[in-house]
Image (cartoon, grey):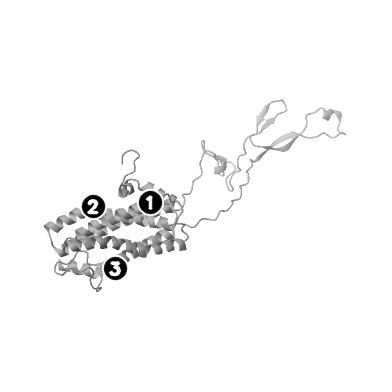
Amino acid sequence: MSGDRPSPLVIERILRDRQGIWQQIVAEGDLNALTGRMLASSAIALACYGAVLGAFHSPLMALTSALKLPLLFLVTLAICLPTLYLFNLVFGARLSVRQSLALVMVAITVTSMLAVAFAPISLFFLITAPDYGFFKLLNVAILTLSALVGLRFLTGGMQVLNDHGLLAPEPATATAPAPAATQAPAQVAPAAAPVPADAPAARQGAEPVAEPVAVPAGAAVAAANGTTTVAPAPVPAQWIGQPATAASPPGMMPPGYGLAQRPWVSPQVRRAEPTQRPASMTLLYIWILLFGFVGTQLAWTLRPFFGDPGQDFAFFRSIDGNFYAEILRTIANL
């Protein structure tokens, strides 16, 4: 992408500027246009890849597979999207329908574009090794790999929405009480005591007797001779059980001198506990499994996509067996 011109291919923007895509979904900015571009790109890419799949049988099968493969993904999305949206609502997520649709369409767009990128490889093996069982397993593996990468984008987008708080219920605001202001301990300093009126004249000329008064630590105290001194900080008392003659070694603080009296020592900060995964993220993985089961069963219902060369053309086959049993049977027959 050069300059400020946006790329005409939506897949290029998804791959190069995925954070911009997530931010657009969070802000719900022009999601209709973005979803429409992803829908059109996915349909075209899946149609091209479906044509390669059906080309193994005949041109008519290629045409029908080009129609049925986009239909497979879109019908699966239509079946499973309401479940994802309602799951999010039940567990307090604040995702809208447009945001949920845009997130899933990002995954489908990546899946379809990656699948069509494998189309030349699939076409190469179609020409050089036209074995029906191998060709079927190869393309199932390609679609599975593409779907895993697309779902990785889906979980990444949901994680970004979780970081913005859209997957968790809105927390209740509580006003914390203001901490009480701490005051420095007071230091006792001498002060002049009053002289009784009936005291002898000889004692009235003497210096007044000092009486203890509370003075804050570090405050200036005026002495009798006019000089000013600073009251020292209080020294904690000896800890219980310490001998009276015990002295602290040079360079060490006496016992009982806590962290409050040692400002140069930073208190140990407790590491925050990791945030728990919201229920919406857990349900997303369940929804992905549900999406996969619905998609594979719908693919089995809409078959054939490849077309067995030993059978005549048919738009649909009878519904018997299941997708997984057919894959295991194909692996056993290789």
Tell which residue pokes out farthest to the top in this image.
226
Question: Which residue lies at the image location 84% right of the left edge and 28% below the top edge?
Answer: 202
Mark 2 = which residue?
117
Question: Which residue lies at the image location 17% right of the left edge and 56% below the top edge?
Answer: 123
Lower position in the chain sequence, tag 3 or tag 1: 1
Q: Looking at the image, can residue 314 be seen? A: yes
Lower position in the chain sequence, tag 2 or tag 3: 2
Give, as a three-letter code, the residue at label 1.
Ala
Distance from disc 2 to disc 1, alpha carbons, whole Å, reads 24 Å
**Residue 4's mark?**
none
State the quadrant of the C terminus: bottom left
Question: Which residue lies at the image location 66% right of the left edge and 39% below the top edge?
Answer: 186
Residues marked 2 and 3 touching at CB (< 8 Å): no
Dot 2: element: helix
Reply above or below: 196 against 40.
above
Give, as a three-letter code, the residue at label 2.
Ala
Mark 3 = which residue?
297
Question: Which residue lies at the image location 86% right of the left edge and 31% below the top edge?
Answer: 200
Residue 137's x, y, as percent?
20, 62
Residue 219's x, y, as percent?
66, 33
Mark 1 = which residue?
33
Reply above or below: 290 against 229.
below
Binning the other alpha carbons within 10 Å of mark 1 as few (below 14), some (14 to 19) or many (20 upward) gives few
Residues marked 2 and 1 touching at CB (< 8 Å): no
Lower position in the chain sequence, tag 2 or tag 1: 1
